[in-house]
Amino acid sequence: MALRTLGRQTWLWKLMSFALFFGAWEIAGRIPISLSFPTFIETFIAFVRMTFNGEFATAYLQTIQPLIIGVAISSVAGVGFGVLMGLWRTMEWFLVVIFIILYASPVAAIIPLVTYMYGIGLTSKVIAVVIMALPLIVLNCYKGVRHTHPSLIEMVRSFQGSRWQEIRLIILPNASSLIFAGLRLGIGAGFIGVVLAELLITPTGIGDLITYHRSVADYPEMFADITSIIALSAVSLTVLLKMEFLVRPETRKR
Amino acid sequence: MNQVAKNMTETKQDTIVEVDGIAMRYEGGVQALKGVDLKIPSGELTSFLGPSGCGKTTLLKIIAGLLTPTEGEVRIRGKKVTGPGPDRAFVFQDFALMPWATVQRNVEFGLELRGMPKDQRGEKAVKYIAEVGLAGFEKSYPHELSGGMRQRVGLARALAVDADILMMDEPFASVDEQTRRKFQEDMLDLLSKEKKTVIFVTHSIEEAVYVSDQVVLLSPRPGQVQRIIRTEIDRSKSPDEIRRDKNYLDYVDDIWAVLRTYL
Amino acid sequence: MKLNGKQIPIVYSLFLWAAIWELVGRYGGLAILPPLSAVFEAGVEMVPTDKFKSAMVVTLDAYFRGLAMAVAIGIPMGFLMGVSKTIDRLIGTWVNIFVSAPLTAVVPIFMVILGIGQATVIASVFLFAIWAIVLDTRAGVKHVNPSLPEMAHSFGASRWLIFYRIYLLAALPEVLAGIRLGLIRAVKGVVIGQLLVAITGIGELFELYSRNFLFDEFWALLLMVFAFAFATAEAVGLVEKRIEYYARTR
Ligand SMILES: Nc1ncnc2c1ncn2[C@@H]1O[C@H](COP(=O)(O)OP(=O)(O)O)[C@@H](O)[C@H]1O
Ligand SMILES: [Mg+2]
């Protein structure tokens, strides 16, 4: 929802908004507000250099893999659980409170425990992504399914539709917007999880690059690392938003 | 039910729907209907009229088979209703259109559920979209249409399944006055061609008298049949003439006299 | 779920889960998952210790300071975005990016600028909490019925009064919704900040317990943090319902 307003802005406004932010950054770096705060230009140069010398590529190869695996697992499991909870009261009774608690709680605190169980490899990162992303996806799907407009359901029944037709033709398409929003939230949370895991436990990927540049006081590089991960997440989420018409064709014309 | 009303329902026409001792108590304990008996003649337009909350929608949904009454039964051509059936089609007050589907697909939907092949149902849908006056809007989505147009889609969808009984729950309630009058006229036109039995819910006296052959007046909750009024109006006249017709105005006054006692 | 035809309240499922936890903890043979009863015992022992108390003080201090800053800056910011199209267009993009960005990655910036300590934790609480508050305040101001300020104007209210009385009061339900989200996100911010800083508050305790395999204590602390997060969110939710009741006439 929030990103949709972003999509409507004209490119000129967007350009100005970027110019304003980067300009303010440049000035803050020149003052400088802190000895460890690089200017925008220094950061930009570092960004370009690392893009072309393969440093980012190597790092992201390690970061993206658990992210994709984790998001895939969370999406399948999340949509599955969410939809089942929406359709089936017993399932709802068992699971909804658990997921609400997980949603409201700082599950990041479990990550140190995950390391104990699974070491510092890929598995731990995948789990970090899943525990952050799953509750969001589950709750959105659940909400979407549970809040189907009752008159649409009555409509299907009035035409003697079967329960399966009701689910396939009404409940799921109707929930698709919220399911989609859930996937976007889940991916956003997945990014948080993977970065946290890399900063905290497994010294690989972009998290490790940030830690390394910090430790050797290469601040422009460190800022470039951080900018790159934020940009990557913003771009993925925007692309996903643009693809909403795949599930809800009526939104294409808007 | 009083004797007069009973006599009035016994006409030459065959009865298609029989409502027999229906009572409805919702789970929360609300008694919506109590002892409703009613005969609905085939090929006519019957409307349910009553104050809001008196159980009109409940009664309609029971006849549609969407709700199970706590007492009594509904029979259609002598057969007990146990659920929705192909002989009945419903038009919803809030249209109940799928926002993600085009007008075409919405109108086809009843047929799609019955497993009719795509090209066949497409043809049928196009026909009924044209009949309700929406030709050219097949590829539009509901959110691009006005309230009146959306309800026409709902009507086309119900007509497309070719049920004998068409049930409408306040179809014009969320439509503005001008659109509403135009729609009422179009609907009467259309129904004179389609030869259907229509059950129509409204809370507007004028609308009830204008569109129906028989008006069923319901009492406040728990809803009971208060009176059944057959409206003998010369429908060959133009809509404006009908609205000035003496009989028409008398019926409106009569009904108002009953309804005002509920206030 | 029904029992003898009666609906069992949904929160009771927690007891069932607690029972499952207890059984798995006892007989499951998982070192990291001790039985719930042992966790409770550890919690009861832990609470009166000085270590725990001082960790709580440090954590709550960071939490409320960061949150207060987020509210104090977030509401005016959202307010400005709501009333001025230009401001909205200039900073809207960034607010929308940051609300769903992996802010974890920004915490190291605070570590180099503010040092490894309380200031960094406060800054991460602020950073996690503020964007939801900004966006919801903006939405609330945008939804203010335009006839409200007009009405006030026709009664001769000054611009200042219109702004503060009408807009803020009318936008209150959304502002509160934003604060509730902010509270939830602030808990995540304080935990993530402290985990990364690793030398203060409950972050230090988590680190200590997991490093020394004190799983009873680890889970006890985790449950307390979860309970705190959930309880604050619910508390604001209750206030929200109250306000919504008054705001329905908007
Ligand atoms: N699902 C329901 N559960 C409990 N009470 C209901 C339900 N639906 C309707 N009612 C109550 O039953 C009464 C009749 O409702 P309804 O048939 O919708 O009236 P009408 O259509 O005449 O306005 C109302 O008082 C309404 O509040
Ligand atoms: Mg009704």
Image: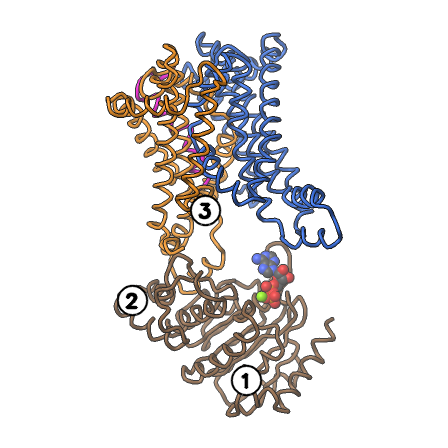
Is disc 1 on the same chain as disc 2? yes
Q: Which residue is disc 1 drawn over?
A: B213
Above or below, C53 against C162 in this view is above
Q: Position of residue C96 (x, y in %)?
A: 46, 37
What colour scheme governs how the chains and residues are painted in the rendered image of this protein? by chain
Q: Where is residue B26 in the image (x, y as percent from the top left)?
A: 60, 58
Residue at horizontal 33%, vertical 75%?
Answer: B127
Q: Who's blue, chain-wise?
A: C
Q: Quadrant of the C terminus of chain B?
A: bottom right
Residue at horizontal 28%, vertical 27%?
Answer: A65
Residue at horizontal 39%, vertical 35%?
Answer: A234
Q: Of residues C94 and C54, which is closer to you in this image? A: C94
**Is there a contact, CB below 8 Å, between mark 1 and mark 3?**
no
Residue at horizontal 51%, vertical 41%?
Answer: C88
Magenta region, residue range = A116-140
Q: Who's brown, chain-wise?
A: B
User: Gap between marks 1 and 3, in whole Å?
Assistant: 43 Å
User: Gap between marks 3 and 2, in whole Å?
Assistant: 29 Å
Helix, strand or loop at mark 1: loop
Which numbered disc covers residue C41?
A: none
Q: The residue marked by circle 2 belongs to what chain?
A: B
Q: Residue A114 appears in which quarter of the rendering?
A: top left
Indicate the amino acid at tag 2: Met
Q: Which of marks 3 and 2 is in front?
A: 3
Judge from the rendering whether residue A18 lies leftward or rightward of residue B202; answer left or right.
left
Q: The residue marked by circle 1 belongs to what chain?
A: B
Q: Of residues B243 and A99, which is closer to you in this image? A: B243
Q: Of residues B146 and C6, which is closer to you in this image? A: B146
Picture quarter with ligand 2: bottom right
Indicate the amino acid at tag 3: Gly
